[in-house]
């Protein structure tokens, strides 16, 4: 019998190798909570880690989308009970850093000898052990644990920690307004949630861009009025045609490639906003003409997934109020013991996969 001091976890070994192995169950500090994971998933960022495109320490447990049950509470944690169902955001701010007190919780992180380090609020599966395991240690539990409302299943709230929060933030950072025209490049899970977020914020014309028929169909269900197949012609020309030459108020880039970033820039109306959600693996180039030589009154904004318990509460309220159903995004289900197979499927985007639910 496996000792109760050990747990199974998906561990980064080296580029192109994430394996299931055993690690000690974490000790719980005064402000921490130990959560027994009941459902988690694989994110596109985890695939960047797998491929060595985003560096993390060898031996790190991967994953940042936890749904579970409180197993043990730290001695100073108040307002929660052991056995309570909870989620924690992919971004887990401390609540007391300079970044938090400036209102930028996602960027909560320690400085370095070269100054501030971006993305410091993303800790799970980045700087500390993550959620693709039997147990997860949640730091600053009173800031980050959000109780799951009665009646909501694991899969109903599974998108809240990252995918839904990130996708919605693309529309929020782009300051989508009632009556806006919005284009969303890539209808993967984050792009689909950006489409849904734009609709909830009042956009009246939403144009999705993709080529996978199943994703294009879900995009229509999530709020897209038009879906453009980028393999069947000039995307920029087609979007300009759909907008009668005006361009869009907000373009959301949810893929992380030069070609989609550039196309998003080219379809903006004067004074429009490019809201970037993609994780980029190479330097970006901004073409002179697309940028109007810097004189187009355009904005380029970037966003890291908002976290913390209040953000999670709001997102779960969207689900509970039936404003949005994200369960169609879960297309495959695996046990934690099968996580290596799940990575193989997800990283190669086989069998129409959108998101994978993983259960210990």
Image: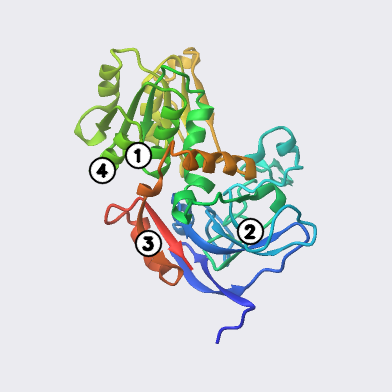
Q: Earlier in the sequence, mark 3 or mark 4?
A: 4
Label 1, label 4: how many angstroms apart (C-alpha)? 9 Å
**Residue that lies at the very extreme toward the left in this rendered image:** 232
Q: Earlier in the sequence, mark 3 or mark 2?
A: 2
Q: Position of residue 229 (x, y in %)?
A: 24, 34
The residue positioned 22% from the left and 36% from the top of the image is 231
The residue closer to the viewer here, 340 or 311, is: 311
Q: Is residue 97 above or below residue 205?
A: below
User: Does the residue at mark 1 contact the one at mark 4 (Cβ under 8 Å)?
Assistant: yes
Q: Is 198 left or right of 130, judged from the image as shown?
A: left
Label 2, label 4: how many angstroms apart (C-alpha)? 35 Å
Label 3, label 2: how many angstroms apart (C-alpha)? 25 Å
Nearer the camera: disc 3 or disc 2: 3
Which secondary structure lies at badge 4? loop
Is residue 308 in view?
Answer: no
> What residue is disc 4 on?
212
Nearer the camera: disc 1 or disc 2: 1
> What residue is disc 3 on?
333
Which secondary structure lies at badge 2? loop
Q: Position of residue 145 (x, y in %)?
A: 64, 51
Q: Is residue 41 above or below residue 13?
A: above
The residue positioned 71% from the left and 50% from the top of the image is 142
> What residue is disc 2 on?
128
Label 1, label 2: how many angstroms apart (C-alpha)? 30 Å
Nearer the camera: disc 1 or disc 3: 3
Q: Position of residue 340 (x, y in %)?
A: 41, 67
Residue 16 placement: quadrant: bottom left
Count every numbered label the image shows and give the total.
4
Q: Earlier in the sequence, mark 1 or mark 3?
A: 1
Q: Position of residue 286 (x, y in %)?
A: 44, 27
Question: Badge 3 local density, few (<14 within 10 Å), some, or many (20+)?
Answer: some
> What residue is disc 1 on?
187
């Amino acid at each position: 019998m496996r000792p109760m001091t050990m747990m199974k976890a998906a561990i980064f070994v080296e580029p192109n190798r994430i394996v299931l192995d055993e690690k000690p169950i974490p000790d719980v500090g005064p402000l921490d909570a130990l959560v027994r994971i009941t459902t988690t998933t694989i994110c596109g960022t985890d695939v960047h880690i797998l491929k060595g495109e985003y560096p993390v320490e060898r031996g790190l447990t991967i994953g940042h989308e936890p749904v579970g049950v409180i197993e043990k509470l730290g001695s100073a944690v108040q307002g929660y009970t052991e056995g309570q169902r909870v989620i924690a955001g992919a971004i887990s701010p401390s609540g007391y850093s300079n970044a938090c007190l400036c209102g930028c919780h996602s960027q909560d992180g320690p400085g370095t000898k070269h100054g501030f380090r971006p993305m410091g609020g993303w800790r799970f599966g980045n700087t500390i052990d993550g959620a693709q395991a039997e147990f997860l240690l949640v730091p600053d539990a009173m800031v980050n644990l959000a109780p799951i409302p009665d009646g909501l299943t694991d899969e109903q709230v599974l998108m809240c920690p990252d995918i839904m929060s990130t996708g919605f933030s693309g529309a929020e950072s782009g300051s989508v307004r009632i009556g806006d025209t919005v284009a969303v490049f890539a209808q993967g899970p984050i792009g689909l949630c950006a489409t849904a977020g734009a609709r909830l914020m009042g956009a009246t014309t939403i144009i999705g861009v993709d080529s996978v028929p199943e994703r294009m169909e879900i995009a229509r269900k999530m709020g897209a009025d038009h879906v453009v197949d980028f393999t069947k012609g000039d995307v920029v020309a087609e979007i300009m045609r759909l907008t009668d030459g005006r361009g869009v108020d907000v373009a959301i880039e949810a893929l992380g490639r030069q070609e989609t970033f550039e196309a998003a820039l080219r379809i903006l109306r004067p004074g429009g906003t490019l809201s970037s959600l993609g994780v980029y693996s190479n330097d970006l180039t901004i073409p002179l003409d697309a940028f109007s030589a810097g004189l187009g009154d355009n904005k380029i904004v970037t966003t890291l997934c908002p976290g913390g318990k209040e953000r999670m509460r709001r997102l779960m309220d969207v689900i509970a109020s039936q404003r949005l159903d994200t369960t169609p995004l879960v297309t495959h289900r695996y046990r934690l013991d099968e996580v290596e197979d799940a990575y193989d499927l997800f990283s190669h985007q086989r069998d129409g996969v959108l998101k994978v639910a993983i259960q210990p």
